[in-house]
Image (tube, rainbow, N blue to C red):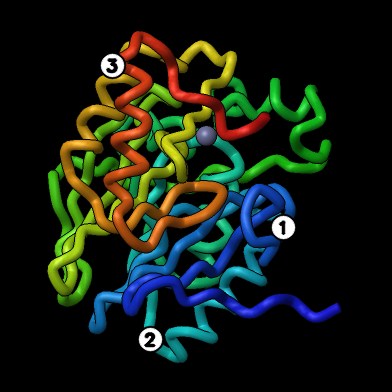
Amino acid sequence: MSWPAPVRLTPRVTLVGSGTLGFGLTDAHDSHVYLLDGGTDAVLLDAGCGLAADRIAANVRAVLGARPVSRILLTHAHADHAGGAAELARLLGATVHALAPAAAIVAAADEDASGLRTARRAGVYPPHLHPPAVPVHPLDAPRLGVGALTVEVHPTPGHAAGHACFSYRDAGARALFSGDLVFARGRVAVLATPDTDLGELAASLRAVRDLAADVLLPGHGAPVLRDAHTHLDAAVGHLDRGALPPGLLP
Ligand SMILES: [Zn+2]
């Protein structure tokens, strides 16, 4: 069977990688990988696990042609999001960026800190998945330019150390790349890892709710292309009732 084509979600955003918790475009273990096209510049949001980096790069080229991707922005260091950073950086000629705590984990290929060693032992990832180290630039500015767009960086710990969400406004609408902080219908992903912090998760959910996003582009599952704030309100509604929002996985 041939590979599925990349999926255009908005005039600026195309899904170029996605695993079994998503659209099945690329390797089963890949998070969503989004291509954000600002016109004269383009970036990737997350990198997948690395087992289908060539397929993701081909999807990027199918969208951009010869135009380059300058940067790969990582939401966090978990292997399904960051494992492909080294190979995609090489294939695309891009640099890799993450908030400092996540940047240190990915740069060192620290499989204990990223949770990969434990997840691999639990059968979440195949035994041969060992993402290589790659230079990662710490994101230390609150916003960055991507061609005609301004992307805001939102430190949002809770699901993982150094987790970031990213947002931009275009044509009057705000789109939010939420990583693994929050998913459609206000779902969350709470892992039994030492860097999961429920207090931080709640504060991060409230902070991104206040962005009043129109479009929600999460790390897994369905994107929300209209009225995304109602999904974020649902998550915060659970917090207001003293409960954690329901999990992404049953
Ligand atoms: Zn994660």
Mark positioned earlier in the residue sequence (3 or 1): 1
Mark positioned earlier in the residue sequence (1 or 2): 1
Amino acid type, callout 2: Arg
Q: Which mark is residue 27?
A: 1
Amino acid type, callout 3: Asp
The residue lying toward the viewer, choosing from 204 and 114, is 204
The quarter of the picture where residue 86 lies is bottom right
Q: Position of residue 173 (x, y in %)?
A: 19, 64
Mark positioned earlier in the residue sequence (2 or 3): 2
Residue 63 appears in the picture as rendered: yes
The quarter of the picture where residue 161 lies is top left
**Count of number-bearing discs:** 3
Mark 2 and mark 3 in contact? Answer it, CB < 8 Å. no
Residue 107 appears in the picture as rendered: no
In this figure, which residue is indicated by the disc labeled 2? Answer: 67
Q: Secondary structure at mark 3?
A: helix
Which residue is at a point 69% across and 76% down the rendered structure image?
4
